[in-house]
Image: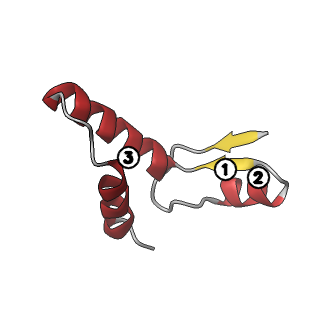
Amino acid sequence: MVAADVVFNPEWTAFLNEAKSRGATAVTGLGMLACQGARNFELWTGERAPFDAMYEALKAEFAE
């Protein structure tokens, strides 16, 4: 089972925590936001996006 939540702040919502405690694979909104940004970067520039750096920057920006 996979549980996804598009909320990115807080990254881990009550819904995702509950789903994870029940054995689901949790997908956070922060990851989705980073993927959207990376894909758009690639479309706009024709270059491979620095996904790890983008994800870490988002995590730092929205640190809880």
Which residue carries the number 3 mark?
Answer: 34
The answer to which quarter of the image holds residue 3 is: top right
Q: Quick one: SS at disc 3?
A: helix
Q: Which residue is mark 2?
A: 19
Which residue occupies 45% across, 74% down?
64
Q: Nearer the viewer, mark 3 or mark 2?
A: 3
Residue that sits furthest to the bottom in the current view = 64
Q: Amino acid at mark 3?
A: Ala
Residue 26 is tagged as 1
The amino acid beneath tag 1 is Ala
Please indicate whether residue 20 sits to the left or right of residue 31 in the image: right
Q: Which mark is residue 7?
A: none
Q: Residues within 10 Å of mark 2 (few under 14, many from 20)?
A: some
- Residue 52 lies, in percent from the top left, at 36, 55
Q: Earlier in the sequence, mark 3 or mark 2?
A: 2
Proximity of marks 1 and 2: CB atoms separated by less than 8 Å: yes
Pick whichever of labels 1 and 2 is earlier in the sequence: 2
Q: Position of residue 60 (x, y in %)?
A: 34, 69
Q: CA distance from mark 1 to mark 2?
A: 7 Å
Mark earlier in primary sequence (1, 3): 1
Q: CA distance from mark 1 to mark 3?
A: 15 Å
- Side (left or right) of 20 relative to 62: right
Q: What residue appears at the point 32 percent right and 32 percent down from the top-left corner?
A: 39
